[in-house]
């Protein structure tokens, strides 16, 4: 991972995390899209007192700023928007901004979180319980159905402007679609017209290419270490099959 020099205008920003984490990758992509000066500190989650002093839940990522640390990716995105100059990544207008946050909330709570319960069987060398497999699918479909009512990719989820909703959704769908394909043999993207093309557009962005250049080898190593059942093909090949 390439470090970028600090910008004294808004303090030294250092993003702590690990490139297998979709949350870390979303925060990193947001910093790149904003044109922020920051450095990356490779860090794994921990529960010791020293780590908890920076991230109260012991999770990654966390962002070290000139004034202290902030954890939880959604909070990090809000902080970035407030303190880093550059292109806005929320749309103008209170309602449009609220709709972007609504999409982030749905993706996190009703798509990523249930799909994450399938990760042990797909990515971690474990076995998913039949009741878990049965319970996850309707929740995910309900979340994707909701998104189909809220977004019309043109080319981005809320129209012509890239927003945090796109960044957050892309990195959560990037892993979630694998779990969906592995468990159900189904595409996560079919429920929303235009979402396949949106995914390709997002994947082609320079920020995405930078982030995924670190993700792919790290994820491959993670899968090998865990003895995972999922064998990593290109996501585009599996989701467009």
Image (tube, grey):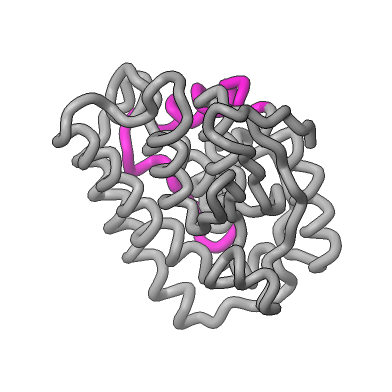
Q: Nearer the viewer, residue 191 or 94?
A: 94
Asked whether 194 or 166 is in front, the reply is 166
Percent of width and height locating residue 79: 43, 43
Query: Residue 238, percent across and down?
Result: 60, 41
Can you give x and y, in whole percent of width and height, for residue 15 in the image? Answer: 64, 46
Q: Residue at x 59, y 55 (%)?
A: 62
Query: Which secondary structure is most common in the magenta stretch?
Result: helix
Would residue 151 be seen by someone viewing this image from the given angle?
yes
Residue name at image x 74 percent, y 33 percent:
213
The quadrant where residue 113 appears: bottom left
Q: Is residue 181 visible?
A: no
Question: Total of numbered circles in the picture?
Answer: 0
Is 141 positioned to the left or the right of 171 in the image? left
Residue at 32% in and 53% down: 105
Which region is colored magenta?
180-209
| Residue 120 image position (x, y, % from top left) | 63, 71
Q: Is residue 77 magenta?
A: no
Considering only vertical position in the picture, is 143 above or below 134? above
| Residue in front for this viewpoint, 36 or 154 | 36
Q: Is residue 62 above or below residue 164?
A: below
């Amino acid at each position: 991972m390439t470090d970028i020099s600090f910008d004294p205008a808004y303090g030294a920003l250092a993003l702590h995390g690990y490139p297998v984490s979709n949350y870390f990758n979303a925060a990193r992509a947001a910093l790149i899209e904003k044109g922020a000066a920051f450095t990356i500190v490779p860090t794994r989650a921990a529960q010791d007192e020293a780590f908890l002093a920076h991230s109260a839940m012991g999770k990654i990522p966390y962002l070290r700023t000139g004034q202290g640390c902030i954890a939880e990716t959604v909070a990090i995105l809000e902080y970035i928007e407030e303190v880093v100059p550059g292109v806005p990544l929320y749309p103008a207008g209170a309602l449009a901004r609220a709709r972007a946050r609504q999409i982030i909330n749905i993706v996190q709570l009703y798509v990523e979180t249930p799909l994450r319960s399938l990760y042990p069987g797909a990515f971690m060398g474990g076995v998913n319980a039949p009741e878990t497999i049965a319970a996850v699918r309707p929740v995910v479909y309900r979340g994707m159905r909701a998104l189909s009512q809220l977004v019309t990719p043109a080319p981005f989820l809320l129209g012509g402007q890239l927003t945090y909703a796109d960044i957050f959704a892309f990195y959560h769908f990037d892993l979630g679609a694998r779990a969906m394909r592995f468990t159900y043999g189904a595409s996560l993207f079919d429920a929303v017209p235009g979402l396949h093309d949106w995914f390709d557009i997002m994947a082609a962005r320079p920020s995405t290419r930078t982030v995924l250049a670190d993700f792919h080898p790290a994820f491959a190593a993670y899968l090998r270490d865990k003895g995972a059942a999922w064998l990593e093909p290109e996501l585009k090949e599996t989701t467009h099959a």
